[in-house]
Amino acid sequence: TERGLGVMHLLRLGLLAFSCLFWAAGLALFTLGVWAQISLADYMLLSTNRYPNAPLILLSTGAAVTTWGFLGCLGVAANLPCVLRAYGFFQLAALIAGLDEGRCCGADGWRDWLTSDWNGTSVSLPDSCCVRRKGCKNRPLLSDDSEGVTAAGIHPHGCFRKVFSLVNDNVFHIAATVLGLAFTQIGGIALACLLANKLTPLFLC
């Protein structure tokens, strides 16, 4: 019927739009992973016991999301119910898996640089640790406490602490974003399953 064809058309358009957004998000993740792998490789040496493979995780996740987003678009364009079901299952798996500028110096603090490959035992810090870009690199500390560090023009806080503080200060916005993504994925799962069921009588899987 004309009504049934209209519903099919709306389902296809909705799922196609969602798949394109999903594909674009995967491409953005992949690009971010490439940038992190190239630009942050040296900094990752400081966190060998924490998250040294974060760029590779971004790369692999971005590649997977991009691939599945493309398959979603292919399933809609070619009317392939099997591909649409697989796409819906992938969205469900991703949803379940998702449920389960820094002004800082070093990972936990400026002392991390003293035991790194950058510096043996003398006080020598990279320019990124200096409050005034090149003001503290070879300046001796007046004392080892926070006042001496501040007087030497060094950022006293570690970068991991700054990141955790940033997350803690913006936890509401992060939670809202995660919930928005979750509901979006639920919508994608529903669209994929509905369209696959509509296509099954026409295209046997």
Image (cartoon, rainbow, N blue to C red):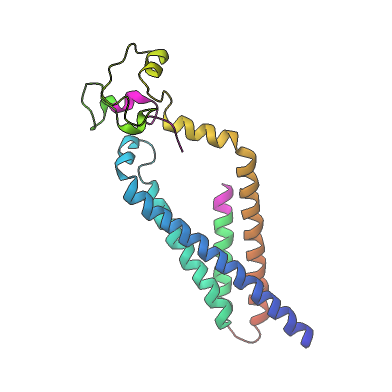
Image: magenta residue range = 96-113
Q: Look at the image and tell me in which quarter the C terminus lies.
A: bottom right
Asked whether 112 falls inside the magenta stretch, the response is yes
Displayed quadrant of residue 183? bottom right
- Position in image of residue 89 (x %, y %): 57, 65
- Position in image of residue 64 (x %, y %): 45, 62
Q: Residue at x 43, y 25 (%)?
A: 157
Q: Is residue 159 depicted above or below 175 in this figure?
A: above
- Position in image of residue 56 (x %, y %): 37, 52
Q: Is residue 109 left or right of residue 69?
A: left
Can residue 80 be seen here? The reply is no
Displayed quadrant of residue 131? top left
Displayed quadrant of residue 79? bottom right
Q: Residue at x 63, y 54 (%)?
A: 182
Q: Is residue 22 depicted above or below 16 in this figure?
A: above
Q: How many marks?
A: 0
Task: Please state which of residues 80 and 177 is positioned toward the viewer in this rendering.
Answer: 177
Q: Look at the image and tell me in which quarter the N terminus lies.
A: bottom right
Q: Is residue 15 depicted above or below 109 in this figure?
A: below
Can residue 174 be seen here? The reply is yes
